[in-house]
Amino acid sequence: MTDDVQMEQMAPLVPPELARHQLSPSPTTIPPEPPTIVMGPAIHVFKWCWDLVRPALLTTGPRRKLGPTAYLDGLRGWAAFMVYWQHHQVWARVGISAEHIFENSWGWDNRYYFCAFPFIRSLFTGGHCAVAVFFVISGRLNESLSSALFRRWLRLYIPCICTTFLYLTMWHMFDIWTAYPKHQSTWTDEVWNWYVELKGFSFVYRSTGPTAPPWLTYNFHLWSIPVEFRGSILIYTSMFAFTRCTRSARNCLMLILIFYFIYIVDTAHYAMFTVGMLYSDLDLQEKAGDLPKIFYRARDFLGRSRKLFWYLIFGIGMYLSGVPSLHNDIPSLRRSPGWHYLSYLTPETTLDFKWFYLFWASALLVISIPRIPWLKAFFETRFCQYLGRISFALYLVHGPVLWTLGDRVYLAVGWTRTDNIEGLKSWLNLYPISRAGPLGMELRFIIPHLFILLPFTLWLAEIVTKLFDEPSVRISQWCYRKTLSS
């Protein structure tokens, strides 16, 4: 409604004498109009570039109002950071084979390190569980079904395409050597090789067979993107199939799907999406006061012990999140201290046992965190919300940063290795730093992170968020609106 219409509607309520003064002010009372500032194209370009590269640390503004599921954004951001942290922990120490300590249980091969202690180990090698948490959170969809289904592929793949293309272009433009993958002789050959890999990577149903490599070698951390898309299709089709089912039937069908994915076909990834969908549905039922009676009975039974119960659930989830992951055979798990008896719970169909335990870990963590006030509050802090905003971009860029800047910094401060350093030998021990400190927290590792690697990676993730991630949301929404019938 315009101001003119509002004034016309209010006119009968204003006395004529007052109206004359209000609507016809004296010329001496009219304030001068401020001068119009015309910004030229160059100023617009400069402002756009500054907004693009300006770190969030240098911006000010009121904190946005948090919604009821804001903690999930913070949890997703923290999970992205844990993926980053684990990859750096292991990659920096390739020369000393530290993965045999980080990714095995505490006491494996009579080696006892603080970083491998139960519960603590998840702070160093929690990346695997973080991916499982991603999948559970992705199952908690509350969008329009048709809109979300239309936009999902674009939303996931536009940032992947753009970042990998710029990464390979950077090699040839600045003559940057990287350990992986093998570089082509020319940029055009590189682009063609990238295209050949990308077309197989982007068609998510061609996941087996000799023509379908499971990894995109230009950023093999993106293996989870096709899984994300297939999981999304699973969620959308399940929602469509269950839409007219009763509450009890819908809950039972989702539990049957979870059992099927875990114990029959060995696809725990999709059980993670399904349990996220189940949690979302139960939340809606709780708000409507329509939960199954067993939940109300359990609440009454626990009484004042509910807080302790959720701490127990969280503790079990944290323990399971530290499942040994270096080997994937059950005999190795059975020999791992603290996992002998748990190993007998592994289904016979499971080929890689860690995903079975990570399903339970992620499911227990996601359900317990919002019921432990201080934990929920932690994931609602500004830092975790910031990580949540850049989480996808952080996941996309941390690998390329690790393989370019990270490789050189680690060699320069003294993290030496003998393999895959053909183009980096001039960086060896340029600025050696003491290795004092416990494994995982050495000065040689922490100092480069505090002053170079972590700030740069977060800054680059902010740029990618503004340049590719957020525009991909707008592009997919625009495409959807353009295809709608009038």
Image (cartoon, grey):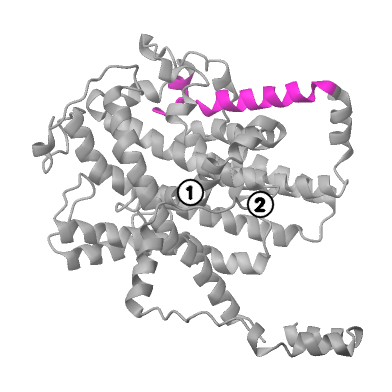
Q: Identity of the amino acid at label 1?
A: Ser
Question: Mark 2, residues whose alpha carbon is within 10 Å: few (<14), some, or many (≥20)?
Answer: few
Q: Is residue 84 left or right of residue 411?
A: right
Q: Is residue 328 magenta?
A: yes
Q: Whole-percent x and y of residue 64?
A: 62, 53
Q: Identity of the amino acid at label 2?
A: Lys
Residue 2 seen in render: no
Which sits in the foreground, 203 or 181?
181
Q: Which residue is mark 1?
A: 391
Q: Is residue 333 left or right of residue 1?
A: left
Residue 447 seen in render: yes
The structure residue drawn at horizontal position 85% and vertical position 54%, both measured from the top left corner, is: 246
Q: Whole-percent x and y of residue 21?
A: 78, 86
Q: Which residue is mark 2?
A: 65
The structure residue drawn at horizontal position 36% and vertical position 23%, both measured from the top left corner, is: 440
Q: Whole-percent x and y of residue 1?
A: 75, 82
What range is drawn magenta here?
Answer: 304-333
Q: Is residue 461 magenta?
A: no
Q: Are marks 2 and 1 in contact (CB under 8 Å)?
A: no
Q: Earlier in the sequence, mark 2 or mark 1?
A: 2
Quadrant placement of the C terminus:
bottom right
Looking at the image, the residue that sits furthest to the left is 426
Question: Mark 1, residues whose alpha carbon is within 10 Å: few (<14), some, or many (≥20)?
Answer: many
